[in-house]
Image (cartoon, grey):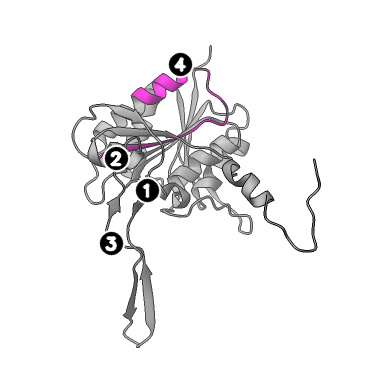
Amino acid sequence: MSAPRILVSNDDGIHASGLQALVKAMEPLGETWVVAPLHEQSATSHSLSLHDPLRIRKVAERQFAIDGTPADCVYVAINHLMKDARPTLVVSGINHGPNLADDVIYSGTVAAAMEGAILGVPAVAFSLVSRRTFVFEHAAQFARALVAALLAQPLPPRLLLNVNLPAYGPIKGYRVTRAGRHSYGADVIEKEDPRGRKYYWIGGTGYEHEKDPGTDVTAVHDEQLASVTPLMLDLTHHGQLDLVRSWPVEGFTQPKD
């Protein structure tokens, strides 16, 4: 049996320390490819560059930088650079910062993994829950152990896992979680440039999370555990289908199935 092919990407860029730590962790597990953004693409979510050409820069054997988004990188990797043999698994990260709760909506790290899952390749996003000091040693050890466990299983092609790792000390364990809720605040800071023109910074500075057992935020912040959260690609709110069907729209009818 041939060795697994592992595609590594991220949103912090091809030279990011977290990416290099993840690549080093993956190399003993299979044939490792790296396709990552040329520049940082944090919080770009799942955007694709449909109206701009992309350029591919080879930086080493099986390592490429693309001047696009994280989703662009995985799309090009699977459909072009690795088209002779698709990857067995896509791993994204290790992100320089958390991707907990609602962060997954904005995250380029999660978007890279999600693009893999959309294209039928199981995928995992890894993030280090820190804001200032980034030491990836323990996070990379957990990433290697988890990926080794996944490669030993028959994985569903659209598997998507979001993994957040405590920032400090050896990781004592992990919990399979659901996405929680947290808030950074909702600040819009107005300032003035030297020419008297106003400009604005968005993004809050305060942080709080709901202490709800079984969630990713509680596992990481309160229990100091790694969180492993399976995500769905289907965004349909199935529980509200009947509610929305019950609303009459004047002048229009719904077909009766």
Q: Decide: marks 3, 2 in contact (CB < 8 A)?
A: no
Mark in the foreground, 1 or 4: 1
Mark in the foreground, 1 or 3: 1
Residue range in magenta is: 145-166
Which amino acid does the dot numbered 3 rest on? Thr
Disc 3/disc 4 C-alpha distance (Å) = 42 Å
In the rendered image, which residue does mark 1 sit on? 181
In the rendered image, which residue does mark 2 sit on? 218
Residue 184 x, y percent position in the rendering:
32, 57
Disc 1/disc 3 C-alpha distance (Å) = 16 Å
Residue positioned most to the left: 169
Q: Is residue 31 above or below residue 75?
A: above
How many labels sit on residues?
4
Task: Identify which residue, 182 or 139, lies in the foreground.
Answer: 182
Q: Is residue 148 found inside the magenta-colored segment of the image?
A: yes
Residue at horizontal 33%, vertical 61%?
185
Which amino acid does the dot numbered 1 rest on? Arg
Q: Secondary structure at mark 2?
A: helix
In the rendered image, which residue does mark 3 sit on? 205
- Quarter-wise, where is residue 203 in the image? bottom left
Residue at horizontal 54%, vertical 28%?
87
Q: Is residue 58 visible?
A: no
